[in-house]
Amino acid sequence: MDALPPLDVVLLSHNHYDHLDDRTVRALTARHPEAMWATPLGLAAFVRARGARRVTELDWWQTTTVGSLTLTCAPAQHFSARGLGDRNRTLWCSWSVSISGRAVYFGGDTAYHTDFTQIGARCGPFDLTLLPIGAYEPRWFMRSVHMNAEEAVQAHLDLTSPALAHRTPMLPIHWGTFRLTDEPLDEPPARARAAWKAAGLSADALWLLGHGETRRVPFER
């Protein structure tokens, strides 16, 4: 927590415990009381009960602004639950974040789906995509809720135009943190590198960051 800069916005994708943790929310609201929390439908009450003062709750394709920042709640293919009786009672989503003609896409937790192309058309062009690459085995069970690395690269291609895909960075997420599924923890990045190379994309545009690593990107208005 001490390593985080001041937070302006916190984006939530869904309510699973590995993405929405009680103690983490309480710590963030205490340390960053002025941050805006953006949630999909049904989760505003959860974060307000844990100290969030500024909260906006959106459905798919709804948009809000935070200062000069525009947030768009976009589709994802996943599910929600925190117990035995609340499955799919709250929404799950991805996010587009744009400011001054620049845009970033955060895929959240999702399977591969056909809406990536529509998201790119409506919210892009993106200058960076953050896409999940882990927790995918066995495929017969996980295919409907989690992408593998090859599908993540295809999603990146769907989100970006052919003219920009080769130089638009992709930052792989959702791997190596929790042991959720059957594949080895170090397999997703290896498969991502192979799939990225097979797609003919620039090696410099695949941003495989280590845990806790920071990459600073010059912002030109």
Image (cartoon, grey):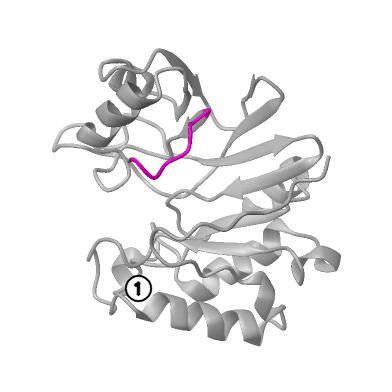
The quadrant holding residue 114 is: bottom right
- Identity of the residue drawn at 29% across and 78% down: 183
* Secondary structure of the residue carrying numbered label 1: helix
Q: Magenta stretch: residue 93 in it?
A: no
- 9 displayed left or right of 197: left
Q: Residues within 10 Å of mark 1 (few under 14, many from 20)?
A: some
Does 131 appear above or below 81? below
Please provide percent x and percent y for residue 129.
62, 56
Does 211 appear above or below 53? below
Can residue 118 be seen by looking at this rendering? yes
Q: Closest to the observer: 88 or 148? A: 148
Please provide percent x and percent y for residue 167.
76, 68
Q: Which residues are magenta?
A: 2-8
Q: Closest to the observer: 146 or 200? A: 200
- Identity of the residue drawn at 51% across and 70% down: 208
- 134 displayed left or right of 131: left
Would you name the residue on which mark 1 appears?
139
Q: Closest to the observer: 220 or 145? A: 220
